[in-house]
Amino acid sequence: MTAVRRFSAVVCLLGATSLAAQTPTPTPKIVPVQPVPPQVTPITEPVTAQVTADTDHDLSDPRALKLSLDDALKTAVQNNVGIQLERYTLLESGQSLRGQYGIFDWFTSANIERQSSESPTTSQFAPSGSRATTANFGLSQLIPTGGTYSIGFNNSRGTTTGGGTFVNPAYRSSLGLGLSHPLMRNFGVDVTRRGILIARNTLGINRDVFRGTLMDTAVTTEQVYLDLVYARQFVDVVKEALFLARDQARITQIRIDVGASAPLDILQPRVQIATQEENLIAAVAAVRDAEDRLRAVMHLPATDWDRPIIPTSPVGYTPITVNPEQAVTTALQLRPELHETQLTTATRQIQYTYARNQVLPQLDLKLNYNAAGLAGRTQEFDPVTGLPTGRFVTTGYSNALSQVFGNDFPSWTVGVNVGLPLTNIGARAEAKRAELDVALARTNEEQTRQNIAVEVRKTARDIDTTAKEIIASRTAREAAGQNLEAERRRYENGMTTNFQVLQIQQQLSDARAREIQALVAYNKSVAAYHRAVGDLLDVANIKIEEPKIEEPSTFRVFDRYNWLNYGSRIQSNTTETKQ
């Protein structure tokens, strides 16, 4: 039995050996190497230093300039260099206008001299020497209709030696009146005072430019002020977005610590934090840029350029009703640009009137009247024989004056001067060129009207558009806030991801920025609308005193005598042709 058992054991061993020899060797299995998880720094240990806004200290800065919109407008208007330049230009044009009245100045002249002469003579009746003292005075002036009058008062005392003189010494005096007046070319009030009219229009144009510069400065200041308001409020938006990103990172870290989230989930919040910190740096820089632009517009002194500016005027939404058609009508009455083009057209019309007058022939009227007197030591003659009696009658200078003012010895002259170029090509060409200038100015005036109408209608639409954007952006911001609250609750319950929460956080930040931007755009549109209408200075309550300029009133009375020229007929004909 024992032998059998041993035999059985040997057989089993041999069978097992044979089976092992027939079984192939198995291929080694490749086990993939698991990557080592990165060491994620907890949120309590920030990779970089936290970024904060240096504008947070502006409110507590004792040197901060707290500025309202009204103060900004007044400061800009008072300090703006462009306004000061236009003020000087306005003063210069006022003096130029006063200077044009110099054509009506009285021109006075005086001539006082004494002369003596001795000459040989071959006759006992001819004087051999003479001495004379003269004193002559003159006065002349241009009159508004184009003529020139003159007054001459001549006086002399003369003595002679030798014979041949019956009055010795002799006192001579005369008073003469003269008038030279054009009847065709250069006749007329408009022709004579064209320089005054042009200077007056130039003064009006410079006054319109001055007012336009005021409005441009005001609207630019308001827009830059609103840019600063937006920049500071946008910093608050970015700070809120950064706070939300950090809070999301805190919540994510808690979930990682309790094993509810993978360690890699902290990376997305950290990316969002870094992005918002970058946005915060750029937003703060935008605030400083906006402050510099406002300082430049206000022309603040160099000592104030390092002071932070805190806008104190809130940017709100006050609905206004705009009637585009009525606004266009008001703009055509108030806009200085249109009045400027109208004055330019009037100036071209004056130049055309003068050029047309120069085509006429020259026809000048000459009038002179003179009264003379003579006195002195006169030898008497016998009325019968005609011989000298040896007696002398002496009269003085007063006797000569008595004869002058008594009109004892009058004389007068009446005449005309006529002249005309045979072809007159130059004057006709100049008149045609001036007529084309008038047509060009009227076309420009019409173009200005159209541009003003388009600008007013556009700004009116901008007000309506931005008002709707405010309502839409406000609704979007409220919905984005509610959506974020819901998404964060879902995240806490494990129903969503970090990516979704961070994306909705960004949507909320964008909605807040768009709402602020819509408010700023609305207020900018209102300012641009009032600039387009032309009542911005009144709406902004900007009062500035224009330089006081007065014209001499001596000859303003002739403004009512426009019929005293050919220009009125020419101008009416031109107007009818245009119509």
Image (cartoon, rainbow, N blue to C red):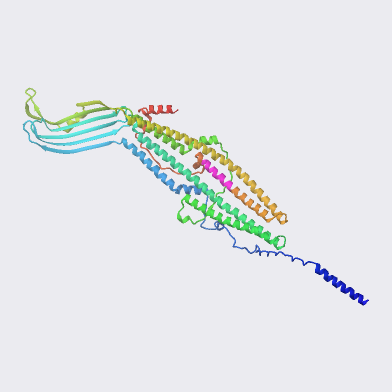
* Residue 73 relative to residue 496: left or right: left
Q: Is residue 524 magenta?
A: yes
Against 15, is 362 above or below?
A: above
Task: Work out whether residue 553 can be spotted.
Answer: no
User: Residue at 27% of width from left, 29% of height from top?
Assistant: 179
Majority secondary structure of magenta residues: helix
Q: Is residue 452 above or below residue 257?
A: above
Q: Quadrant of residue 468?
A: top right
Residue 240 covered by magenta stretch: no
Which residue is most to the right? 1
In this orientation, does residue 164 appear? yes
Quadrant location of the C terminus in the rendered image = top left
For the N terminus, give its image quadrant: bottom right
Question: Residue, x 35% and y 27% (percent of image)?
Answer: 566
Number of numbered callouts drawn: 0
Q: Residue 353 or 422: which is nearer the viewer?
A: 422
Q: Observer-nearest residue: 92 or 153?
A: 92
Q: Which residues are magenta?
A: 517-530
